[in-house]
C-alpha cells in the first residue's frame, strides 16, 4: 500500500504538466481505442497493460521514454504515429507522457482493466 502511495505521489509531482498527468492524457486521448476495445491488443488502462503492450510489443520501457513505443508514437517518430487520423497530442501532453514513463509508468488511468 505504501509503495503505491509513493508511486502516485511521484506521478503527481513528476508527471504533472500544466495540470495534466500522463495518465489523464492517456484516459482522455487514448482509451477510446486502447482501453476495453484493446485495438491491436493494447490495453493502456493499467500498468500491466503498458508493460505487456500489444501486437508490436511493450508500450513502455519503464524509466526510458526514448526507447518506449508509446512515447515515440505520440511524438510521431518512426512509422507508427498516434493518434492516427486525429489531431496530434499537444506538446505538454507529450511531455506528460515522457515524464510519466521516466518516472516508471507504474500507475494506471483509474479506468478499470485490472491493476492500477
Image: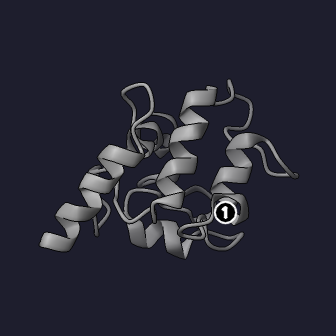
Which quadrant of the structure image shows residue 19?
top left
Q: How is the image coloured?
A: one colour
Answer above or below: position of 91 versus 10: above
Q: Is residue 6 left or right of residue 70?
A: left
**Residue 114 vs residue 16, the one in the foreground:** 16
Residue 33 seen in the figure = no
* Spot occupied by residue 93 in the image (x, y as percentages of width and height): 54, 33
Image point (80%, 51%), residue name: 80
Residue 101 seen in the figure = yes
Answer above or below: position of 93 versus 97: above
Answer above or below: position of 49 versus 13: below
- How many marks can you see? 1
**Residue 92 vs residue 70, the one in the foreground:** 92
**The C terminus, quarter of image:** bottom left
Which quadrant of the structure image shows residue 5?
bottom left
* Spot occupied by residue 51 in the image (x, y as percentages of width and height): 51, 73
**The N terminus, quarter of image:** bottom left
* Spot occupied by residue 102 in the image (x, y as percentages of width and height): 53, 59
Question: Mark 1 packing: few (<14 Cα in 10 Å), some, or many (20+)?
Answer: some
Image point (21%, 67%), residue name: 4
Q: Is residue 4 left or right of residue 68?
A: left
* Spot occupied by residue 107 in the image (x, y as percentages of width and height): 34, 60
Image point (26%, 51%), residue name: 110
Determine the secondary structure under disc 1.
loop
Image point (66%, 62%), residue name: 68
**Residue 112 vs residue 63, the one in the foreground:** 63
User: Would you name the residue on which mark 1 appears?
Assistant: 68
Answer above or below: position of 112 versus 96: below
Amino acid at each position: 500500500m505504501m509503495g503505491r502511495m509513493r508511486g502516485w505521489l511521484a506521478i503527481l509531482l513528476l508527471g504533472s504538466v500544466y495540470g495534466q498527468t500522463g495518465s489523464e492524457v492517456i484516459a482522455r486521448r487514448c482509451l477510446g481505442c486502447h482501453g476495453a476495445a484493446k485495438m491491436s491488443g493494447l490495453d493502456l488502462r493499467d500498468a500491466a497493460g503498458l508493460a505487456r503492450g500489444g501486437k508490436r510489443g511493450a508500450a513502455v520501457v519503464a524509466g526510458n521514454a526514448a526507447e518506449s513505443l508509446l512515447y515515440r508514437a505520440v511524438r510521431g517518430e518512426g512509422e507508427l504515429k498516434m493518434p492516427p487520423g486525429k489531431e496530434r497530442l499537444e506538446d505538454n501532453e507529450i511531455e506528460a507522457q515522457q515524464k510519466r514513463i521516466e518516472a516508471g509508468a507504474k500507475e494506471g488511468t483509474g479506468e478499470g482493466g485490472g491493476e492500477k
